[in-house]
Amino acid sequence: MTQTTDPEHQPPPMVAPPGHVREGAPLRESAPPGRAREGTPAVRAPRVHRAWWVAAVASLAIISAGAFTTMSGLLVSPLHQEFHWSRGTIGFAASVNMALYGLTAPFAAALMDRLGIRRVVVGALLTIAAGAALTTVMTQAWQLTLYWGVLVGLGCGSVAMAFAATVSGRWFARRRGLVAGFLTAAGVFGQFVFLPLLSWIVDRYAWRPAAVTPALAALVVVPFVLLLLRDHPADIGLKAYGAEQFTPKPAPLPGAARRTLRVLREAAGTLPFWLLAGTFAICGASTNGVMWTAFAPAAHDHGMPVTVAASLLAMIGVFNVVGTIASGWLTDRFDARRLLAVYYALRGISLMSVPLLLAATVQPSMITFIVIFGLLDVATVPPTIALCREFHGEDSAIVFGWVSAAHQVGAALVAFLGGVARDAFGSYDMLWFAAGALCAPAALMALMVRSRKSGSV
């Protein structure tokens, strides 16, 4: 007998109560293809929940974008030698890249609510590839700022920490801290996988082939995103991982830019937002701003080959993965504020030791620093995401995007000032001491963020 598609004439046996699916029961025909009716999951969750596959594909996109994070440090010396641009000029382009990397994040998070995750990620990867390719044919300093600073910055900012917050928030009700740590670790995994290869290419061939290599990697990821990434569990009739109830996919939210600014205005009226933004600005200054742009040239100033310096940065990436995933696990179990305070305090101490450790050869003390800094470098992300979620709920991904913007502004300022300091003083030593000292107020600010359980500040 032919079954009608009118929902009012569905036979009673086909109707399941909310949150329940009879074993082997098909999706009700009144539901649109690929989407379940409200309150009625379409299919039973598979043995390996689809959320983990989504996280895996998201990690590939983040890895490909992460390859560009440390590339700026490898370009400083080659561009200075070929074009005779000052390190301050090159540092300015790197600072634009970092600033846009952060400022793009909240708008990208809102745009994902409007257009869907898949479209935004594909567009970001294509923009990254275009910017890197155009950089290889530049002849003027302003073109470096436009191609590498603007295009690559916009693309990487769309596939960054706010993207990780969006995926973990939509697809996971349990293990959110762990997944946020895993996706954040994917970015640094991209750094340490690509960095030794890119430094070898720069040393053996030139900087242009090195710039094209991660662009090609970004293009390779695009088909995987198109085929496997989905915007919401409801698209395939599933509950989020660990959720007790099925959640329908929200309707697309128009006015992504207006919503992003509205969320900023509302969040800016709370002290926790400013405390988190302040700590994350210092986080950016004491990681991306100093390590990824100054470590390789500073090591080279002390007689260390650039390939060896790049290998040390790659080692930091290895321990980034361990530290970030461990931090996500800890965030699911302990007070995020205290975790942040410990992370910042230890990071500050480690950074202030760098001028004493740099030498032409790698000593055991330098390896110790690499391990400690690597464990602490990106460990701040999972607890910061958790605190944004605690105070801002459904808008937490956008709020975290704005907090990430502060992170990149801090990184951009130090990247620019570091180049200026090197031109002026002939050394990066003051930069390491200043970045380490900044971590002390960051630790104090983290402790000032009061839990909602005891009343928000």
Image: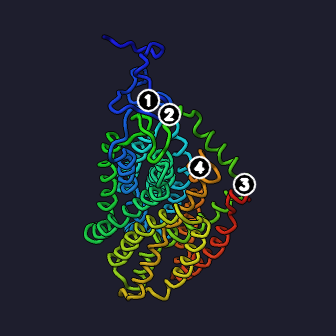
Marks 2 and 3, Cα distance to the nearest angstrom? 30 Å
Q: Nearer the viewer, mark 3 or mark 1?
A: 1
Q: Tell me the quarter of the picture where residue 75 sits.
A: bottom left
Q: Nearer the viewer, mark 4 or mark 1?
A: 1
Dot placed on the residue nearer the N-terminal end, 4 or 1:
1
Which residue carries the number 1 mark? 36
Which residue carries the number 3 mark? 270
Neighbor class of circle 1 (other Cα within 10 Å; few <14, some 14-19, many 20+) is: many
Neighbor class of circle 3 (other Cα within 10 Å; few <14, some 14-19, many 20+) is: few
Q: Nearer the viewer, mark 2 or mark 3?
A: 2
Q: Tell me the quarter of the picture where residue 270 sits.
A: bottom right
Dot placed on the residue nearer the N-terminal end, 2 or 3:
2
Dot placed on the residue nearer the N-terminal end, 3 or 1:
1
Local secondary structure at mark 1? loop
Marks 2 and 1, Cα distance to the nearest angstrom? 7 Å
Circle 2: residue type: Pro
| Above or below, comparing residue 354 to residue 315 in the picture | below
Neighbor class of circle 4 (other Cα within 10 Å; few <14, some 14-19, many 20+) is: many
Q: Residue 309, how many percent across, how many down? A: 37, 77
Residue at 37% of width from left, 57% of height from top?
63
Neighbor class of circle 2 (other Cα within 10 Å; few <14, some 14-19, many 20+) is: many
Marks 4 and 1, Cα distance to the nearest angstrom? 26 Å
Circle 1: residue type: Ala
Local secondary structure at mark 4? helix
Q: Nearer the viewer, mark 4 or mark 2?
A: 2
Dot placed on the residue nearer the N-terminal end, 4 or 3:
3
In the picture, measured across the screen, residue 436 lies left or right of residue 362, that is right
Which residue carries the number 4 mark? 396
